[in-house]
Amino acid sequence: MAGNGLPSLGRVKLADLVPSEGLPTDSYKISVSTLSQSLAQYSAAVIQFSTSDGALLRSGLDSARLYFHQRASYPGSDMIHTNETREWCKTSGYYADPQLWQESYDYRPGLTPIDPNTMELPPAGLPDAFSLLGKAARDILDAISFYLNLRSSPFSEILDNVPLRSREISSSVLSVCCHARPSFQGAQHPSLINQDDGQSVMFSDNDQQIEKSLITLMKSDKVGLHVRDFQGRWVLVDGDLGPQEAVVFPGLALYQATAGYVNPALLKTDITNMQANMYGRCSLAFKLMPKSMTSLSCSEMRAAGHGVEAQFQLPVPVDDFMQRSHPTDQLLNRHSLQSFNFPTAQDGSVKPLMRRKKNSSKCKPLPPSKRLRLEAQRVLKERVQDIADKRGIKLRFCTLKDCETHVHSLDSPCANIRMEIGWPPGVPFVHPHDLPNKAKVEFLKAYEPGWTATNDTENPSP
């Protein structure tokens, strides 16, 4: 990964991520690869909008500055909320979170009045910005699905209707935020953190966050958004954004729905020198959210041939998932966390491969059965999936129990697929992760010429 890694955050034109009928274009495949590689390395990427769309986003930021500047310096008690007390799918209007030194105005179609009958006018242009960023977020989600070799629009069942039907309330939300407005009273005092280069950076207390969205798109008027990369370093992701650019990062819902293949972004905001600015730091953040009455399931990942770990096997109700706490140390310190791997630039193909971590001489050797399982998963991705892609075959594995009879029948449901891809005789057509060890060995011998049991394990037991 270090050899093929991006030197900085990947930049992709939104127009190149819009899918079209027929075969994918070269620009689409390159853009999808750049996006996915950037998400794997930095948990973020830069999306470039058109000139007119960029003007719309900048207009929204100007309106946000004016909206928060004219507000009272201390909000009423009914407007004080924290992440623990807000109902995630019913937020609308103005809120303040003193713990994060942040104010926000949530625009949620179906709930937020478009023409409020109050003296206080909301930020302007929110319906247009919501429509623009919502379409962009769905195109980005489809691009990630393409890279993972999932079917088209695999998450449509958990997303809102487009457009919303009568009396429906949007699950997704556009949050207009103001961070560290000096005149906002009641906020907790920020803390100073010394960086490695000796400079001091100011972050508000409790500011490390992980969004629970599928995808979040953010456009801000000042730099300061930091994301932790895959090496554990904090990277400034909006330091050189152009006027038509925004930052995209994945959230916890996508991490759950992809069985951990797409890491969520851990964020924090630098508010150094904000006290000298009368407006603070304003941003537009669109959060593509799953519907509350649906479930996050990894069935699409399983159908595409990806291994699904035990913790992702059962569907999770979205409402429960959103209200549950998710400790960051458990998410970011998982040794078996799966991620993207990338072909070289000369390859020209885009395949969803799992990154294999190099064994360290200081680490305890893996048990033979686990090494065998990892080797079988690698061969599935690098050999079998390639054969299936070239022949236009969708791999849909059987269960071990059902396939014990299939392997002895010529008219079984999986017989044609096994014959077309050269599946070894007598080996059940199930995901290699679930094969008995002896069957894994036969699988590896069939697809990896010259492979023997001594290559990666010793005398595996069934």
Image (cartoon, rainbow, N blue to C red):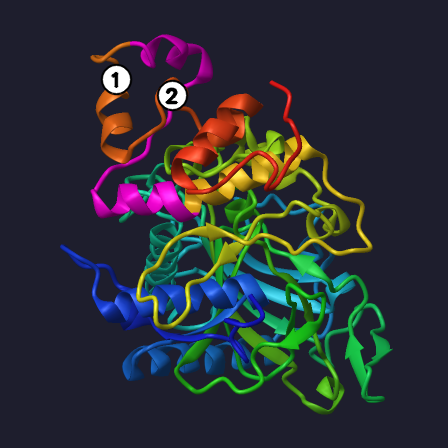
In which quadrant of the rendered view does residue 229 lie? bottom right
Image location (x, y in percent) of residue 445? 45, 34
Left or right for 74, reference 123: right
SS of the residue at dot 1?
loop
Query: What span is colored magenta in the figure?
Result: 382-408
The reply to whether residue 160 is in sight is no
Left or right for 47, reference 278: left
Image location (x, y in percent) of residue 57? 40, 77
Image location (x, y in percent) of residue 328? 73, 51
Left or right for 278, reference 42: right
66 relative to 452, above or below: below
In the picture, the disc for residue 413 is 1
Give, as a three-letter code, the residue at label 1.
Pro
In the picture, the disc for residue 305 is none
Q: How many labels does the image show?
A: 2
Q: Are marks 1 and 2 in contact (CB under 8 Å)?
A: yes
Q: Which of marks 1 and 2 is nearer the N terminus?
A: 2
**Residue that badge 2 annotates:** 398
169 relative to 206, above or below: above
Callout 1: few (<14), some (14-19), or many (20+) C-alpha neighbours within 10 Å?
few
Task: Please say whether residue 407 is one of the residues in the magenta stretch.
Answer: yes
The reply to whether residue 366 is in sight is yes
